[in-house]
Structure formats: structure tokens, C-alpha cells
Amino acid sequence: MAFFQYLNFDGVDLPLPDSYEVDMADKEADSGGETEAGTVQRDVVRTGVVTISVSFSVTQKWMRLLTGYKQQEKIRVGFFDPETASVRQTEMYVEGFKAKLKKDTSYKGLWIVSFTLKEM
């Protein structure tokens, strides 16, 4: 049985994630808010801005590769979009990168790497 490819960074297929959560939110202008009459006024600037929280169990080799993506200003990301049930392309950046040693092995450890991808 083949696994579905959830993430691709700059043409490189990433390993199967341990967790994968997609959030789509609207970006609102500062001019929105509650009016004097008590109604809510929304000034939506952009809809469906994607944020992806993901974690992986990886070897040291993959941890180094993922750390390299963290340092890039932007990454071309192919991700599984649950709204359309297909792969979508966008530019994103990495935020909140964490690497934790789960187990020391002869292959220089099993690492838990987690981060959030934010759409530009």
C-alpha cells in the first residue's frame, strides 16, 4: 500500500508526517471591528490563508534538511489541501521550528521535528 504525499518543499518529497493539520483563515484589515451600534463589521483582505502544523519522526539526515528549510525566506510548498482533496502549490515560510531527540540510535538518533508553515 502506497502512502499519500502530504508535503513537498521545492520539489523534494518530505517523509510521511506523524501529524498534519491544515488551518484556513481570513485576514482582516484593522478597519474592521464592532460599530457604535454593536454590529460587527469585517473588512476581509484575503480569504483562505493556509497555516499547516506538522511533525515528523526523522533521522539526523532529514533533521538537517528540514533545518535548512527553516532558514529560507520562502519555500515553494506542495501540500495536500483537505478543502479540495488535491495537492495545491503556494509559497510559505517556517515558524516555530523545534527538534527533540527521541531516541539515540546507531544512525545518530531518532528526532521529532515540528514546525508551522505559514502562507505568504
Image: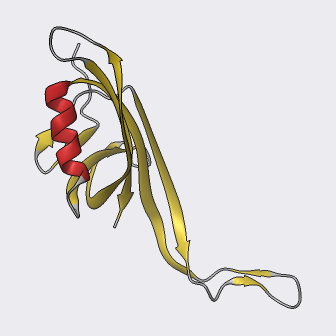
Nearer-the-camera pick, 45 or 73: 73
Quadrant housing residue 18: top left
Q: Can residue 14 be seen in this view?
A: no
Quadrant housing residue 30: bottom right
Residue 86 in the image, given as x and y percentages of width and height? 31, 44
In what quadrant of the picture does the N terminus appear? top left
- Asked if residue 55 is positioned above or below residue 102 in the image, the reply reads below
- Asked if residue 102 is positioned above or below residue 30 in the image, the reply reads above
Side of 46 relative to 16 (left or right) = right
Residue 6 in the image, given as x and y percentages of width and height? 29, 36
Which residue is located at x 53 percent, y 68 percent? Answer: 26
In what quadrant of the picture does the C terminus appear? bottom left
Which residue is located at x 66 percent, y 84 percent? Answer: 32
Which residue is located at x 21 percent, y 57 percent? Answer: 75
Side of 3 relative to 42 (left or right) = left
- Asked if residue 37 is positioned above or below residue 114 in the image, the reply reads below
Residue 111 in the image, given as x and y percentages of width and height? 30, 24
Nearer-the-camera pick, 26 or 93: 93
Which residue is located at x 24 percent, y 17 percent? Answer: 109
Residue 76 in the image, given as x and y percentages of width and height? 19, 57
Q: How many marks?
A: 0
Nearer-the-camera pick, 90 or 101: 101
Which scheme is used to colour this image of the protein? secondary structure
